[in-house]
Amino acid sequence: MALDPNIIGALAPVAVVGVIGWVVTTWLRVKHGYPLENSWGKPMLPAKNNEMVERIKLLAQENAQLRAEVGSVKDRLQVLERIATDPGKRLASEIDALSTKALN
């Protein structure tokens, strides 16, 4: 029993589009750092070596430093926002209270 050429002609573009979609999806995953998956849907992670472990440690340290810096910048920004939005009388009274506190 032979397959009808019309059916083969209709299914061929679907197969080609499917393969192209798979290639594009895999390329996007690699480009954006997502792990590839095997045929069972489990991630295929690269083997770790000493260089990668050291690089991860350095990146973790840098991340912690940057988080601390962002936290201090947020605190300073909150103070500046409070100064910019407070009425002048209240700000002046707080500054006077601090200066008299420093003198005592």
Image: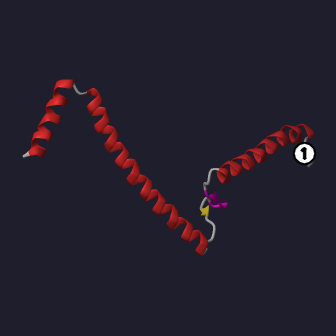
Please indicate, yes or no, whether residue 48 appears anywhere in the rendered image. no
Please indicate, yes or no, whether residue 79 appears anywhere in the rendered image. yes
Magenta residue check for 82: no
Residue at 78% across, 45% down: 20
Q: Position of residue 21 (x, y in %)?
A: 73, 44
Identify which residue, 25 or 12, lies in the foreground. Answer: 25
Q: Position of residue 63 (x, y in %)?
A: 46, 57
Residue found at the very far bottom of the displayed protein: 50
User: Which residues make up the magenta segment?
Assistant: 35-40
Report which residue position mark 1 lands on. 3
> How many C-alpha atoms fall within 10 Å of the one at disc 1: few (<14), some, or many (≥20)?
few
Give the quarter of the image for residue 50. bottom right
Relative placement, left or right, of 75 versus 6 is: left
Magenta residue check for 37: yes
Residue at 40% across, 51% down: 69
> Would you place residue 102 above or below residue 44 in this image?
above
